[in-house]
Amino acid sequence: MKFHIEKLKNCKKKIIITIPFSKIEPIIKEEIIKTQKNTIINGFRKNKTPINIIENRYGELIKKKIINKIMHENLKKIIKIKKINIINNPKITINQCNNNHNLIYSVEFYHFPKINFQKLKDIKIQKLSIKLDKLNIQKIIEKLRHEKIIWKSTNQPVQKNNQIFLNCTLQNKNYHNQFQYQYITNIQKTIPQLEEKIINKKIGDCIEIDIQIHKEHPELILQGKKIHIKAQILNIEQPTTLFSKEKFIQYLMKKFKIDNDIKKLHIFIKNNIKQEINNLNQEYLINQYIKEITNMHTISIPNFLLQKEINIIKNILHQKYIQKKGNILESIYWTNIKQKSIKQINTFLIMQSIINQKKIKVTEVEIEKFFNQLDKKNMFQNIPFDFNQDDTIKNIHNIILKNKIYNFILKSCSIIKKKCNLKEAKIINKQFNLL
């Protein structure tokens, strides 16, 4: 077997392979003899059919079967020898396959990008350093207390974190729809055009905006259309804390099944916050590392992969819109699908390249050990459990894999500690994800 590899564009390669006819012919003849032994043809006893009749009847079929097998076997050998990590099913084209001539065929495929980790040794990546002391824990408890709220109507103008009730009318030349809409300001769940205009408005006030519905919005009838929105404020509600400080402490102890011991409660909260900090740090470091790689390496995304990801996100949003009776004013349905797809594919390609090049694996023993170490009261909530056992194991596998990638990043570049509190850490991570 002879072969040579050509580099094409967009992480694409082409292998041209030549197999000598002298290697193929004996295998075909052997298969014809096997067929003769196992085939009964009218007028001949078993195993007595002349070879030329077998060749005439089954020769082409046998030849195709053998050549197909040889092509795939030799391709596997080349991929193993050259350590190529293929993304898609390769496209095989037979260039020459005549009798008494060598088999020549070409294989085109996309592969994962090869990352030069030596260049990444000098990069500097921030690690969030969050100190948890008694004062921090008390602040976290107080923040949790303020999240347990009831809503009370107010005649005051709309402010941040108010719950708003609207009567909305959407219309253009060929469309008219009226509905009631409820949302909380300042949590980025509605379109920014509405959010900007509603602050400081009062009950009875009307907000009117003209918007262009983007071409990928799940409301199919309005895709790419201009629409006029009129929203009248029916009611404004302000959040009011449900518990006093003392009652909230009692509520937490009861919820987490902790005896009347404030120290134990602090330890419990501290351990859970540590897990959250670890998750924040992991996501933040990995995202920085991926950004550095994309800055240093031009990663060309194969068109088929981009289109596939776009279709997946479109279908998810469309199904969610139908099942949850989504509202056209909700910001989730205004996602830049192409931009989101590119970011997700870049992450996937780079993460998989790290796994391939550094030979990162997860064993069954590691999964079992991880499972056995879980504190059922505290840590199971951080794992997406499924009624399907295979899916649960897959989720644990992915957590361990991500931990290993995180540890690899920690060892492979310069880490700079950035001091901040938990709230600042969440803001930093959120802002970085928006880049």
Image (cartoon, rainbow, N blue to C red):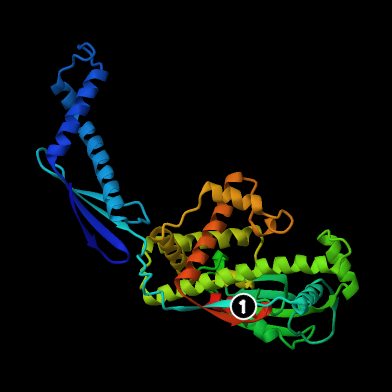
**Label 1 element class:** strand
The reply to whether residue 393 is in sight is no
Q: Where in the figure is residue 301, as x and y percent of width and height?
A: 38, 66
In the image shown, does 234 or 101 lie closer to the viewer? 101
Q: Residue furthest bottom?
A: 200
Figure check: 55 above or below 324: above
Q: Residue furthest left?
A: 100
Q: How many marks?
A: 1
In the image shown, does 178 or 261 lie closer to the viewer? 261
Image-based side of 252 in relation to 55, left or right? right
| Mark 1 closeness class: few <14, some 14–19, many ≥20 residues within 10 Å | some
Q: Which residue is rendered at x = 56% and y = 69% of the image?
A: 283
Q: Where in the figure is residue 232, as x and y percent of width and height?
A: 74, 80
Disc 1 designates what residue? 129
Q: Which residue is rendered at x = 58% and y = 66% of the image?
A: 219
Quarter residue 235 falls in:
bottom right
Q: Which residue is rendered at x = 73% and y = 75% of the image?
A: 184
Q: Amino acid at mark 1?
A: Ser
Q: Where in the figure is residue 414, as x and y percent of width and height?
A: 47, 77
Q: Where in the figure is residue 106, as x and y percent of width and height?
A: 22, 52
Quarter residue 434 falls in:
bottom right
Q: Which residue is rendered at x = 74% and y = 88% of the image?
A: 200
The reply to whether residue 36 is in sight is yes
